Image: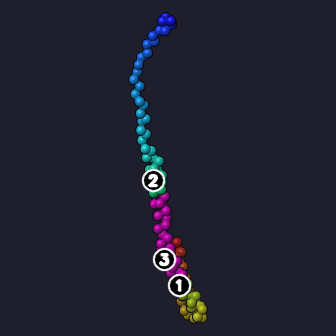
Amino acid sequence: MADELKKIDLTTVANEPSMRAKKAFPWKLIVVPLGVLVVVVIVLGVMLLPIRGVMAKAKDVISSGQAAAAAIKNQDLEKTKNELSITREHLSALEKEY
């Protein structure tokens, strides 16, 4: 029986506990969409800048149109002609602004 059980020599290697390598935080996942968002906001801001002028001119047209409507209701022909010419001028200014 002693012949059957032979000693087996094994090389012993110290197994170090495997440490997971820390993965770097994927900054590209945050920086790229944030950059795209900033570019979109800037483009929209540049496109919407002229709207302030258009809105101001539109308010002028509305006020002159209301004055013309009031003159028409009062059946004052001279004032109606004057208000309509002012409204026409405001409309042309609005068209140039737009």
Gap in angstroms between the C-alphas marked 1 and 2:
45 Å
Q: Position of residue 55 (x, y in %)?
A: 50, 75
Question: Secondary structure of the magenta portion, mostly?
Answer: helix
Check residue 51 for magenta coloring: yes
In the rendered image, which quarter is residue 91 located in?
bottom right
N-terminal of the pair, mark 3 or mark 2, is 2
Task: Name the spot of residue 85 as percent of width and height, x first.
Answer: 54, 86
Q: Is residue 41 above or below residue 73?
A: above
Q: Nearer the viewer, residue 49 or 84?
A: 49
Asked whether 11 or 28 is in front, the reply is: 11
The amino acid type found where label 1 is placed reads Ser
Residue at x-position 49% and y-position 62%: 44
Q: Is residue 25 above or below residue 78?
A: above
User: What sort of colour scheme is used for the picture?
Assistant: rainbow
Real-space Cα distance between discs 3 and 2? 33 Å
Query: Which residues fall within the magenta stretch?
Result: 39-63
Q: Is residue 1 something one can see in this rendering?
A: yes
Asked whether residue 85 is in view, the answer is: no
Name the spot of residue 75 as percent of width and height, x first. Answer: 60, 94
Specify whether 49 is left or right of 71: left
Q: Residue 81: which disc?
A: none
Q: Is residue 37 above or below residue 19?
A: below
Name the residue located 47 percent from the left edge and 60 percent from the top edge: 41
Considering the numbered disc 1 on the image, is that residue within a helix, a strand or a loop?
A: helix
Q: Residues within 10 Å of mark 1 (few under 14, many from 20)?
A: many
Q: Which residue lies under the disc numbered 2?
A: 35
Q: How many marks?
A: 3
Which one is earlier in the sequence, the residue at label 1 or at label 2? Answer: 2
Where in the figure is residue 77, as x and y percent of width and height? 58, 93
Q: Which residue is mark 3?
A: 56
Residue at left 45%, top 50%?
A: 30
Q: Which residue is mark 1?
A: 64
